[in-house]
Amino acid sequence: YDEALARALGFKRYVEDSDGYRLLNRDGLKKPFSRETDVQLFFGLIFFGSDFDVNREVNNGRGPVDFKISKGAIDKSLIEVKLASNTALKRNLERQVAIYEKANDTRSSVKVIVFYTAEEERKVLKILKELDLTSERSIVLIDARADNKPSGSKA
């Protein structure tokens, strides 16, 4: 779990503070680069050099989880990446990951939620409040907006 959370927070720092948002929200495009599979592929790079076994789209029953990180059979956690634009986000946070945890025989997971607009950020915060998850450390919000990251010389 600690490795999964640390890598999710590293991805967050890269996207928000080191121009990584440009990979997820490309300048000049009318629509952000917003397919979950694209975000997952970029996210997978954050595990380079890890001592843990990292697998994508593991399906041990009830559907594939985005990432399963393990060090042996007992020390394992899941990571599920979601876009804020996902119309089933609330339901997914309520049920999906718990089902994946049970199928993979673990009780630890990290949920990564990427948003591209201020409106999407408000939507996510509202859902987290409704589900009483605002202080849940296993939920990592990633701001991939292009409109709120001025260069240092303009800040």
Image (tube, grey):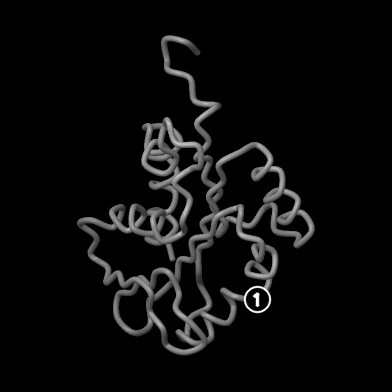
Q: Nearer the viewer, residue 39 or 12?
A: 39
In the rendered image, residue 35, in percent from the top left (x then y), is placed at 46, 56
Residue under circle 1?
A: 95
Front position in the image: 11 or 83? 83
What residue sits 38% from the left and 79% below the top? 58
Q: Position of residue 42 (x, y in %)?
A: 34, 52
In the picture, residue 119 is in which quadrant? top right
* Amino acid at pointer 1: Arg
- Picture quadrant of residue 17: top left
Residue beneath the point at 34% across and 71% down: 56
Identify which residue is drawn at 73% across, 56% down: 127
For the N terminus, the image quarter is: bottom left
Residue at 47% across, 89% down: 61
Across and down, in percent, residue 154 comes to 47, 10
Q: Residues within 10 Å of mark 1 (few under 14, many from 20)?
A: few
Most extreme residue toward the top is 153
Q: Is residue 138 left or right of residue 55?
A: right
**Side (left or right) of 132 relative to 60:** right
